[in-house]
Amino acid sequence: MVACAALIVPIKVPREISEHTGLELSGAAWSSALSRYVLVSDDIIDEGAKHTPRLFTLSEAGELDSAPITIEGISELNDPESITAGPDGTFFICTSHSLNKKGHLPESRRRLLQITLGADRKAKIIGHVDLSVARLADGKPPWGEAGTLDIEGIAFREGALFIGLKSPLAGDGSASILRLSDVVAVVKAGVVPTGALSLWSRGRFCVPHDGKSVCEGIADLAFLPDGSLLVAGNAPKGMPSDGGGSLWKLEAANGTPKLLKRFDGLKPEGIALAPGHTSAIVVFDTDGRQPLWIRWPL
């Protein structure tokens, strides 16, 4: 009954943003310093300028603040897909590391950033790294060589960054979660040491659609206090449609994911625990239309 009471509702977008900026919300994290959710949008077009490095802040009442936050020290942030709270009030932001529509992979699309963000609403980069060059001890990429890399979810826990892949999926349709150990040292150095990024979990996030079983990739991650994970799932680009994304719970690495909710016709893209950890929010990418969100009771 509690779950049924959770409603998908519009996010209130002030005119200062709606008249100048197209939003495709793709990640969320709670900021205690701001008493706001901090959001990333995967393709910002601001008065004609693409890939503007901006963050958006959302109140608990579901209204965006009229003034976005510009990330200082960087001119472009291309396809930011996820954000998560890190240590000491910092945040990690990750771009997709995927090919763009023209088949190109510019540097601005291959970035894992760590930023500071305080009550003054100033965001400053303190480290960054390109994850696409990471390799295992045998010289192979941690995500295998079965398809194009697409990173859409990250979550921080106990000094490590957990990275959910939208693609590639494994041969059996399972989606991968990687673990980047000692992430603060890695982004500070700007280099991923061999073996620092490894496979942590693999599971099948598959749903029925049009009489078939369709496997989803990972769109975002959020750790619960007990160490289990909330996972947003969506069909990877170029793969069979799932008819709308899903919300899952993963109790442990390599466990069987539990389906919590299907979202027909919608793409859940960002998850964040609410303060107090009695609920989580999920934001949806609506392809430039008015963004939506849901508060999910835990």
Image (cartoon, grey):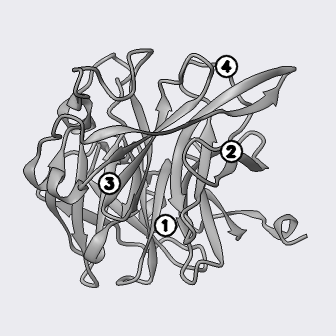
Residue identified by numbered label 3: 93
Q: CA distance from mark 3 to mark 4?
A: 28 Å
**Label whose residue precedes the other's in the sequence (3 or 4):** 3
Which secondary structure lies at badge 4?
Answer: loop
Q: CA distance from mark 2 to mark 3?
A: 25 Å
**Label whose residue precedes the other's in the sequence (3 or 1):** 1
Mark 2, Cα crowd under 10 Å, few <14 / some 14-19 / many 20+, is many
- In this rendering, the label closer to the viewer, 2 or 3: 2
Residue identified by numbered label 4: 240
Three-letter residue code for mark 1? Arg
In the image, 252 versus 162, the foreground residue is: 252
Which secondary structure lies at badge 1?
Answer: helix
Which secondary structure lies at badge 3?
Answer: strand
Residue identified by numbered label 1: 15
Q: Quadrant of the N terminus?
A: bottom right
Quarter where residue 224 is shown:
bottom right
Three-letter residue code for mark 3? Ile
**Label whose residue precedes the other's in the sequence (2 or 4):** 4
The reply to whether the C-beta atoms of the residues labelled 3 and 4 are less than 8 Å apart is no
Q: Which mark is residue 257?
A: 2
In the image, 266 versus 127, the foreground residue is: 127
- In this rendering, the label closer to the viewer, 3 or 1: 3
Which secondary structure lies at badge 2?
Answer: loop
**Label whose residue precedes the other's in the sequence (2 or 3):** 3
